[in-house]
Every structure is written in C-alpha cells, then in structure tokens.
Image (cartoon, helix red, strand yellow):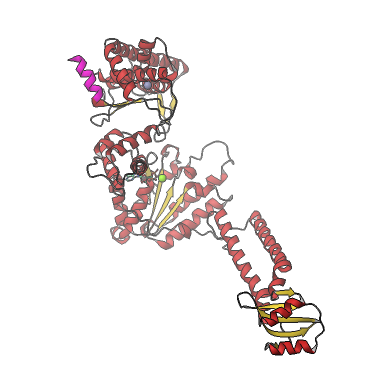
Amino acid sequence: MREQPNQRKTLLYYVGIAALIMLLLNIFVFPSMLQPQVNEVTYDEFLQMVQQGRVSEVAYQDDQLVFIASGDNYRPAYFKTGVWPWDDSLTGLLLQYGVRFSAEIPTQASPLMSFLVSFVLPMVFFVVMWQFIMRGMQKRMGGTNALTLGKANAKIYIEAQTGKTFADVAGQDEAKDALTEIVDFLHDPGKYANIGAKLPKGALLVGPPGTGKTLLAKAVAGEAKVPFFSISGSEFVEMFVGMGAAKVRDLFKQANEKAPCIVFIDEIDTIGKKRDNGITGSNDEREQTLNQLLAEMDGFDGRKGVVILAATNRPEILDPALLRPGRFDRRIPVELPDLQGREAILKVHAKDVKMDDGVDLKPVARATSGASGAELANIINEAALRAVRMGRSAVSQADLEESVETVIAGYQRKNAVISDKEKRVIAYHEIGHALVAAKQKGAAPVTKITIIPRTSGALGYTMQVEEDEKVLLTREDAMNQLATLTGGRTAEELVFHTVTSGAANDIEKATRLARAMVTRYAMSDEFDMVALETVTNQYLGGDTSLACSNETAAVIDGLVNDLIKEAHESARAILESNMDKLHELAAYLLEKETITGEEFMQILEKQEA
Ligand code: ADP
Ligand code: MG
Ligand code: ZN
C-alpha cells in the first residue's frame, strides 16, 4: 500500500489530539496525583483528634503542623493545620496520647511514584491511543493495515473454515455436480497433473439473486478443506485510485503461496463490466482492475491448485475477455429452485427450527413457485417469529402458511381503516378473480381469497396454486391468466357500474403478459416467429428492450390491447352467467374476510347441484 497524502493528514490529526490531551493531563491531573491528599483542619479540631487518640504521627514542617491521623474508616490520612506555637503543654498532650514525633511527614510523592506517573503512565496512554487510532484507520481503509505501507495485505480475506458443506445447499444438484470435480481437484491436484489434465482455472456461478451462489462457493471451500479467499467485486473499486489493481495482484500472490486454495470473487460484474462503454477515462480505475485480473488469471499456473470462483447475476454485461477459455470458461447456472428443490431448501432450514410434529412442507413448497432459496429461508424464519409472537414453542402449519403470505405480500395491516362500502368493492373484485379462474378449464385452482390488506399495498388477493409445476406456458394458459387478471375489474363493472383504481396491479401484470405473448412468444397471428423484444437482464427482473421499428411498435401496442380486450370479454361472459354465485360468494367473503379454496368450491358447487 502506498502512503496517501490524506492518510498522512489524518495521522497528523490524531497525533495532534493525543498531544493536546497529554498537555491537559499534565496541567490538571498529574500534579494532584503526585501529592498525597492533604486535608486542612483547624487547631481545635487537631486537639480534638489527638484526644480521640486518632493521631499517630506529627511533624513541624514549613511553619505548619502536619500530622497523620486515622480517618473515619481508620485508614491513615494526612492533615495539616495553621501556624501555632509549639508549647510544652502540646508536647505533654502528644506524649500522653502516644503520638510519635517525626522529622518529616512526606507530602511529596516518592521518586518511584513520580517516575510512574510522569513517565510510565503517558507511555501506556500513548500505546493505547495508538492502537485505537490504528484500529480506526484499518476500518476506514477496508481492513488494510496502514503500517504495512507499500504493500497490500490480502490475508484478511482468508476464511479457513467456512463452516458450510454441500449438505447446507439443498437442490442445485447440477451445480453441485459441476463443483464436485473442483473439490476433487483441490483435494489432490497431483492426480490431475500426472495425467496432464488441466482443470478450468475459473468457474462462474450465474443465477438470480438469493439462489445460493455465495453459499455454494463457501460449500466448495468447506468440502475441499482449503483456504478460502473471498472478496466482493465492489471492494476492488471503492478503494483509493490505483488500489484495485494492486489488490488483485496481491490477492493472487497470496493465493499462490497458499495453494491449493479457492479465490472467490462475489458480484464480479462490478469489475468485470464490458470495457467498451465509449466514454474513455471515466472508469479507468475499474478498467485497470479488470486488466490486472485478466493478466493474473493468465499468469498463474493452474496445476498448482488455485481455483477461482466468481458469482454474478448479470452475466450478459461481463466482458467477453473474462469468459474466454483459460479464464472463466466454465459456467455453472444456479437457477431458481423447482418444486422438489424448494421442498428440500425448506427442509434444510426447518432443521434449525422447532416444528410441530405434523408439519408438512410440501404445500408450502407448492405455494411458493418462483421463490428463491433466500426467500424460502426467510419464510421459515418468519414462521418461527410468528410462533414466538403467538407465545408458542414450536412452528405450526398455520405459521408457515401465514409467513408465505407475509413474504409475498407483506404483513397484515390489521388496523387499516377501510370503509364498508370499499370493503364490498374489494370483496367483489377478489371473488371476480376467483370465479373467472374457477370457471375456466385448466386454470390453476384457487387456494385462498382474502380481503385483509397487507403492508405491500395489496387490499386483498386471490391465491392460485398450480397442481403440477409447469415449465411451459401454452397460449390457452396465457389467455386464462389474462381473463383471471381482468376478472376483478369486470366484477366491479358489473356490480357497481363504475371502475376503481384497485385494479392497477392487475392491469400492469396483464399488460406485461400480453406484451410478452406478442413480442417474445409469437402468440399473435400478425407476427411469425420474430423476436420483437429481447430480455436484457434475465436474472434481475427481466427487463426487455424493443428490437423493432417504431411502426412495428405501434402495431404491437394495438395487438396487446386486442388480447386484453378479448380476455376482458371472456371474463365478463363468465361472470354474467354466474351473477348469483358472485353475490353469494362476495357476501360470504365480506363476512369472513379470508376463505379457503375448499370453502369457495363448496359454495360454488352447492349452487350448481
Ligand atoms: P446469492 O449469492 O445467489 O445471491 P446466497 O448464497 O447469498 O445467494 O443465499 C442467501 C441465503 O439463502 C443463504 O445464506 C441460504 O440461507 C439461503 N439459500 C439460498 N439457496 C439455498 C439452497 N439451495 N439451499 C439452502 N439454502 C439456500
Ligand atoms: Mg451472493
Ligand atoms: Zn385484482
């Protein structure tokens, strides 16, 4: 590490403060410490103390009587009293009470004491102060020791025992398979070297946030029982200018010394962004760091057993140079878990929590399609928190069900004030969704309807859970979903002959789905298999960018509108022919606030019979 000017400034600043404190101590504190505490008493008080037999020693010193007497708790204390002639009666009195006459009673500290106070104490003080300063600096400078100037120190990133193993990672079997080979290599690099096989130097873990990429990297280190150098991409760039590259150099130097080992660069996209962003010079620091990383990856000998793992959720923005053979040439997808994976993840986290005997995690897994590992871990934790809130000692099925909704839609807003009139609108809206869903062939069954508002802003919602996990979306499925989405608004129209803002979220979702049908799934008649939009960041929300002319964009807008109109009409047809049920179910929901899918189906079927 090079010494930076502002670093020197802060150092001076601290030394200045320390000197000032020393000065103040010297003026105010030390002098009094160097002398025994001497109390002044009047002459009659002195005589009284003598008569009480408390005085043990007396001396005539500097025109004053100085004496030692036991205090309230019989510890000797120093006293003095004003000038007074020493006459024979006093001598007699003192003799009578057995007071010793001393030549001198020290009111000055011993030389040893003054040495301690004026020399040793400041030293101790400075050492403590210095350590305090160094600690503060270390923190500010991202953990590097300011004393090792001119040399960065990456030792601090070692986490010898991550404490994680593959058993902590549920699901993700493909990723684990791919990483097992790396673990094996780290156990015995020689085996691979003997045959002349080269293992990839780097593997890139790619997937949405919260799917366990960081966890997997730690598990690899835990399984291989090798040192684990972990650093986050952002740590390279937020350092002083020029530090990023030095840090990379040092990291690899240390890794080479510690081989076999793992170097893990989390969130590599922060340094690994494509370098062609046009504005030269603006990002020199990041670019230098990336260049250094590329050079180091080429430079080190892969046979020694240094494996570089990196994780990102934005693989599309990585510089292609990073991905070419010899660098991060192995790409390990870490996708959102499927039904089985979700159940396994729930099980792993449920192990840490006390559960009722009968708790079944399968329905939870089923209801959380699309949830990441982190969200599932959160669901278990929320359930445990709820159990504590309710004063129970184990997590029940109900806790789990409620926590799924908490994680999806936020906490219940029990004391939100909603007028009866609006509650009615909301009830009809939700039953509208549910009825349209139930009356269509192949739509996912309704499992729960509620009009209890949530902190996410939802005023109510209808939960649908697919019976089997689907990976394909047919045109019919998509149209069903669109109709269900428009069902809420349609019910409002039919019953109240007006529309409200309550459907905003439905409208957004319907538009996104209809747009995807036209632009990405080619489900419209107008366009053949043409990609009119491309997904720009697959793992972070799936934003899209238009890849067509303005004229086509206008046509797309028309088609999207047509699709939604078609869905809206079919929803209206369904509700119009089921008006009785709509009223009955809405009244029931209004009364109960939350109803299950079974209750809903019972009422629906009872009427039909
Ligand atoms: P990422 O790095 O992909 O964003 P993390 O590895 O940081 O995600 O995961 C966050 C947390 O989510 C983990 O600490 C773990 O508790 C939980 N988690 C994620 N995926 C899994 C999994 N497959 N098995 C068990 N727990 C998981
Ligand atoms: Mg991570
Ligand atoms: Zn709605």
Q: Is residue 171 visible?
A: no
Q: Quadrant of residue 411?
A: top left
Tell which quarter ligand 1 is in: top left
Percent across and percent down for residue 498 are 42, 11
Query: What residue lies at 43% left-to-right and 49% top-to-bottom?
Result: 265
Tell me where the magenta segment starts and ends, as one range: 599-609
Of helix, strand and loop, which mostly describes the magenta segment? helix
- In front of the other: 286 or 481: 481
The residue lying at 59 percent from left, 49 percent from top is 241
Residue 222 position (above or below residue 382): below
| Residue at 30% in and 13% down | 575
Q: Position of residue 295 (x, y in %)?
A: 47, 51
Total labels: the figure holds 0
Q: Quadrant of residue 561?
A: top left
Considering only vertical position in the picture, is 324 above or below 557? below
Q: Position of residue 403 (x, y in %)?
A: 34, 37
- Residue 608 lies in the magenta-colored region: yes
In the image, taking residue 317 as reference, residue 101 lies left or right, namely right
